[in-house]
Structures are given as C-alpha cells and as structure tokens.
Amino acid sequence: MLQSIYIKNYALIEELHMDFHRGFSVITGETGAGKSILLGAIGLLLGQRAEARMLQAGANRCVIEAEFDLSDYHMDSFFESEDLDFDGHSCIIRRELTSSGKSRAFINDTPASVSQLRLLGSRLIDIHSQHQNLLLAQEDFQLSVVDILVPDKSFQEHYRSAYDAYRSARSALHAAREAARRDSEEEEYLRYQVSQFDQLQPSAGKQAEYELEARQLEHAEELKETLWTVETALQGNGTEQSGCLQTLHEATRHMQAIQSLLPEAQTLAERLDSCRIELHDIADELASHAEHIEVSPSRLQEVTEWLSTLYSIQQKHHVASEEELLQLMEGFRERLQRVENAEQQLQELEQAYKQAEDALRAAGKRLTKARSEAAQVVEQQMVTHLQSLGLPNVKFAVSITPRTEPDVSGYDQVSFLFSANKNGHPEPISAVASGGEIARVMLSLKALISSSVNLPTIIFDEIDTGVSGQIAERMAVIMRQMGDGGRQVISITHLPQIAALGQHHYRVYKEDGDNATTSHIVELTPEERVSEIAHLLSGSELTEAAIENAKALLRGNGK
C-alpha cells in the first residue's frame, strides 16, 4: 500500500510530505484546489509522460517520491526479474524532472526505465478517474472483467498456448503455400538454371585450374621451345655443342685428380658432383614437361568455351567469385527440390495446422465454459450490488457470443447488457445507462474484481459523479468494505455522505502567497472533519445546522 508521498516543486505544490493509511480514506477540497495535481504526481510515479511545464514556476528541479509497503503482496519475483533491489517489505519510487525537460526514475535507488515504472505501477495502484467510465463501451474491458473472475487461470493459459501454436502452424502453412506458388511459377526457370550448372559442373578450384590451362594452351609452342632451349643448355645437343652438365663432369674429374696435392679438392669435387646431379634432374624434368605440353587448338577451344560460359553465368547472377557461384547453384537446387517436394510438405503442414486448430478449438470451448460460469457470478453479484445502490429493478446480463474468427483472447465476444427499469429490456450498457448509473456500475465492478486482483491501492477520482444522498452513502459503504478487505482505498469526493464514512480524511486547499499560489494537503483531526463536512453540506457559509448535520453524519458512520 501507499505509505507516504513527498512532492517538491510540482505544479502548484512547493513542498509536501504526506502519510497515508490502510483502509478507506477520503480526500476533499474545492474545485481547482489541487486534487488533480496530486493524482498527476502519482501518475508520474506510475510512468506517465513527464513535461517541463509540470515544474513549479521558477523551479529548476521537481522531485516526487513515494514509499510503498509490499509486505503482503509477494512481489519478490518481479524485482528479481527486473534486477531491482528489494528487501521484501519497502519499495521507494522516485521521479525527478528538470526544467530542461529531462526525466530520471529510480526504484529503490536503482535507475529505472519508464516502462519499468509502468509495469510496477500497474501492480501497485489502480486510479479510477471519470474517463475510465468509457471503458464500459469497450468489449475487451468487459471480457477482462469476466476473465478476472474465472477461478482457474489455467484455462486462459492453455488457450494462449494453443493459440500461439495455432498461429505458428497457420503462418508456416501460409508461408509454404506462398513459397510453393512462387517456386511453381519459376519451376521452368529453376530447371534451366540447374541444367546449366549440371552441364558446366563447377567445383571448388576448377575455375583457377581452367584459367591456367587456357593460358598454357595459348602459349604452348612458346613454352615447349623455352623448355627445350633450357634443357639443351644443360644437356647439350649431343653433337659438337656440349652442355653445362658435361662441363661440370669434367671439372669434377680434374678436382679429383689433385686430391693428393690439395686436401680440400675432394670436398670441392663432391660439391661439384652434387650440383651436376641436381641439374641433371632439372634437365630431365624440363624434357618431361616439354614432351607433355600439347599444342591442341581443339582443347583450347573447349577450355575457352567453358570459361566463357562460367563468366557469363557469374555476370548474369551478379556473383564475383567461384564460392558465391557454388552457393547460388546450391540455392537453385534446394528451391527446385522444394518444388518437387512441395506437395508432400504442404500435406504435412496442413495436417499440423488442422491439429493445432482442433487443439485451439478444444481449449476455446473449455475457456468459453469457464467464462460462462464466471458470467453467472458477475450477473448475480452485480445485481446485488446495484440493487443496494438504489436500482431495485436493475437487470444486468453478460452476453457471450462467438467470434467469426478466434483471436488471442478466445472465441468469445462479451457484452454487458443493462436496464434500470422494471419493464426495460437489457441493452448494451454504454447505450442506455446514465452518468450516475455508469458510476454505480463501475464501482460495483471494481468491488467485484478487487477480491480477485491482488492490488494494494485503489484510488477513485470522483466516482460519485451523478449521485447524491443515500446512494452516495451506499457507494461509500462499498468502498469502505473494499478497504476493510485488506486494501487501501482512497476516494476523491465532493459528497459529504462519502467523506463522512472515510476512516481517514484529507483536505486539499490553495493558499495565496505574496508571489504565488500553492496547493497543500493535510490530514484532518476529528474536529476539522466536522468543519470540512459541514462546508460540503452548506457551501462556503458555515451554519450551525450544517455543523450539526456533519456531526450526525459522522456519528451515524461510527466516527
């Protein structure tokens, strides 16, 4: 629950520190005194948008900080999942705003994002303002009320799981059908591309190999002539011209002849002979290469045509390397194989989709049954609440009709039907209920679902609009019962009947200073409550009759 709030330099509030209590509290004050400012400050803590204009005139920095007691609400998992410090009891939220428009947020002194404030705030406070009455016209709100009152939440969880599986199966089937359609249209093209690759038979390294062979074939005669020339230089031509091998042989023999005279001659002779042997091997290799080089115009034409085809394919498909071409070839083969296997794949996906659809339909039926049972509870309890709020002839029904197509919420459309008259036929509530009736319906719904939602604090902002007298008192009784149920309920009201029933009473007022007007909020003493409620009864002029009426209201409500 909200334990305290500190506000500095926000709108008309210069500085404010306020403690709050468990149970039912009321806030009163003249129109424009600052009640909406207080709600605006709380809204910032809940992640609403911050703007520089919210700062008090002349201030450079605005601070709003609230402390919550969460001892009874088992929220450890939230703080753990968001990586936020939490001692299991206290939670402090702080929002800071500068005149430059920059905003910072902290949860237990840890920097937090606005989305984290919204997520945490949705689990801490529910602010019901007058515009929320418009929710009654929204089908998803009406559905959510019924779902909240379904005791076993596993029906919704199982349905959402089945719906996710259904959507995945449907998407996979649609994607496969579209791919099959596109591939089928391109089948002839794919087969032609694959046949081109099959004729070409590219492989890793083949392009470089053919490019080298083409160069060799183009210069075959030049290569053979060069190789034979070098081989002749080594071996000689076998007639009068001797090669360097013969010269080395003779040099070796001369060095061996002087071994007895020059000890180093033997080593030098061995080295010369080693050179001769190595050059002899080179000469043999040169001759072998020369003999194997073929001057073949037909082979040159074959290799050139292969390379020309390869270059043409690379250019056509905008690939720059052999590796990219091989990847492209594999992609064409896979697409062609997909076309050939499309029928079988589609059959498998259609079967999976039907299974998912059947599972979804079964989960939807179970959820619809659970909702129908919860709807009966809603109808019974809403009639009881509304009758106690001065609508003795009320009819309230929950209409559940099937959707044309399921969505994430189920197969059901939910509509609240209402009639306040004895001879009236229930119709959609937003079309027939008056403002006062809407207020009573919303309060009854809040009371109905509060026991199922573990929400620490509920704030009602003038939910009493359009009612007065005994009906207002009955509304106050319901809010007090909600507070007695372990929640913190705060009602902003102009009605003395509601103010008198509060267990704690706060007053918001404005004060004119020398240079500015500021808003303040104080908790009233029992004596001050009498005066405040008397003002609500009689207006600005405080009369003895109003004071006595105020005392009577407080006595009648146990104060």
Image: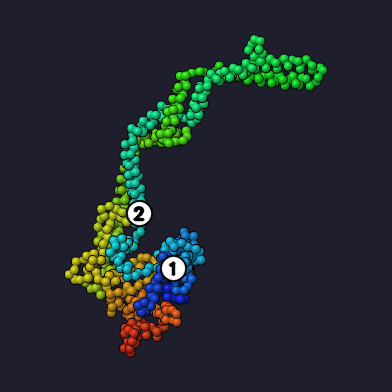
Q: Which amino acid type is marked by label 1?
A: Ala
Quadrant in the rendering for residue 75: bottom left
For the C terminus, the quadrant is bottom left
Q: Nearer the viewer, residue 60 or 474?
A: 60
Residue at left offset 47%, top offset 76%? 15
Which residue ends up furthest to the bottom in the rendered image? 544
Mark 1 or mark 2, which is nearer the start of the sequence?
Answer: 1
Q: Is residue 286 left or right of residue 55?
A: right
Quadrant in the rendering for residue 30: bottom left
| Residue that carries the numbered disc 1 in the rendered image | 52
Q: Nearer the viewer, residue 258 or 367?
A: 258
Q: Which amino acid type is marked by label 2?
A: Arg
Residue 160's disc number: 2
Query: Where is residue 530 shown, x and y percent of the image?
Result: 37, 85
Q: Is residue 448 visible?
A: no
Q: Relative to 117, say whether 349 is above or below.
A: above
